[in-house]
Image (tube, rainbow, N blue to C red):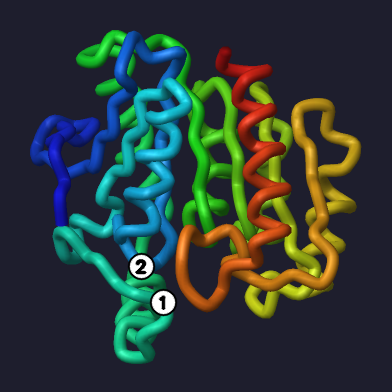
Amino acid sequence: MSLNAEIKTLDGSDTFGAYVARPSGTPRAAIIVMQEIFGVNPGIRRKCDKLAEAGYLAVAPDLFWYMERRVELDPDVEADMQRAFDFFGKNDCDRNIKDIEATIHWIRGEQGVAKVGCVGYCLGGRLAYMAAARTDIDASVGYYGVMIDQMLNESHAIAHPLLLHIPTEDHVVTPDAQAKMHEGLDDHPKVTLYDYQGIGHGFATETGNRRNEEGAVLADSRTAAFFTENLG
C-alpha cells in the first residue's frame, strides 16, 4: 500500500501511516477521508485522488494501524470480507477519533491548512458523526454511517455542519435505525440528511459490486457542494 506520510499520535508515543493526495496548487482546504472496514484500499485512495483533483489536500489515515498496519481488503472477496468484519468487531472508535484529531492537528500544524473537513464511509460514516460531535472539524460528511442511531445523545455537541447520506435499502443500517436518525437529527440546525430510495449499503464505493452509479453521482455532487459552501 502506498501510504506516504506518518502522523504522530495525540500523546506523541507512536506514529501511524496515511495516504496523502496533494492538489497541484495551494490547497483550498483539507479533507480527511475515513475508511470503511476494508482499510485504506484502492477505493479510498481514489477518493483522495479525486479530492486532490478538486483542489483539496486529502488525507486518509490508517485507522486500523494499532491492530495491524496497512490493512487493505477487497469487499468483493469473501475471505477479505470476513477479515474486515473481524477488524470491525475488535475496533475501538474512541481510539479512531483520537487519531482523527491527531490528523487534524497534523494538517493545521505541519501542513499549514487551516480549514479541515472530513468524509467517511460505513465505519468512516460513523466516525464523521463522532468527529462532528467531538472535535473542532469545520465540516463533516458521512455515507451510510453505522450505529449513529446509538449515539444521538451526542448530537447537542455538533457545532459545525454535518451531512449524512442514507440509503433506504441499507442491510446494515436498518429502517428502524434510519427512522431514529431522522427523529433525532432532522431538526438539528447543523445537520442535513439525504435519503436514497431503493439503494443499498456501499453505494458510493469507487469500484466493485456495491456501487450504484446514479446514487453515487448524486451523493458525491451534494458532498462537493457542501464542502464548497463550508470549506471554500
Count of residue discs = 2
| In the image, residue 111 above or below residue 205 | above
Query: Who is closer to the viewer here, 222 or 61?
Result: 222
Distance (Cα) linking label 1 and label 2: 7 Å
The reply to whether callout 1 and callout 2 are in contact (CB within 8 Å) is yes
Say which residue label 2 marks: 38
Residue 74 image position (x, y, % from top left): 34, 75
Say which residue label 1 marks: 75
Residue 96 image position (x, y, % from top left): 36, 48
Residue 111 image label = none
Q: Nearer the viewer, mark 1 or mark 2?
A: 1
Callout 2: SS? loop
Amino acid identity at mark 1: Pro
Q: Quadrant of residue 197?
A: bottom right
Query: Who is closer to the viewer here, 11 or 120?
Result: 120
Query: Is residue 95 shown to the viewer in this render?
Result: no
Quarter occupied by the C terminus: top right
Amino acid identity at mark 2: Phe
- Mark 1 and mark 2 lie on one chain; the one further toward the N terminus is 2
Name the residue located 36 percent from the left edge and 37 percent from the top edge: 100
Query: Who is closer to the viewer here, 160 or 77?
Result: 77
Quarter occupied by the N terminus: bottom left
| In the image, residue 175 above or below residue 107 | below
Neighbour class for label 1 at 10 Å: few (<14), some, many (≥20)? many
Q: Is residue 195 left or right of residue 224?
A: right
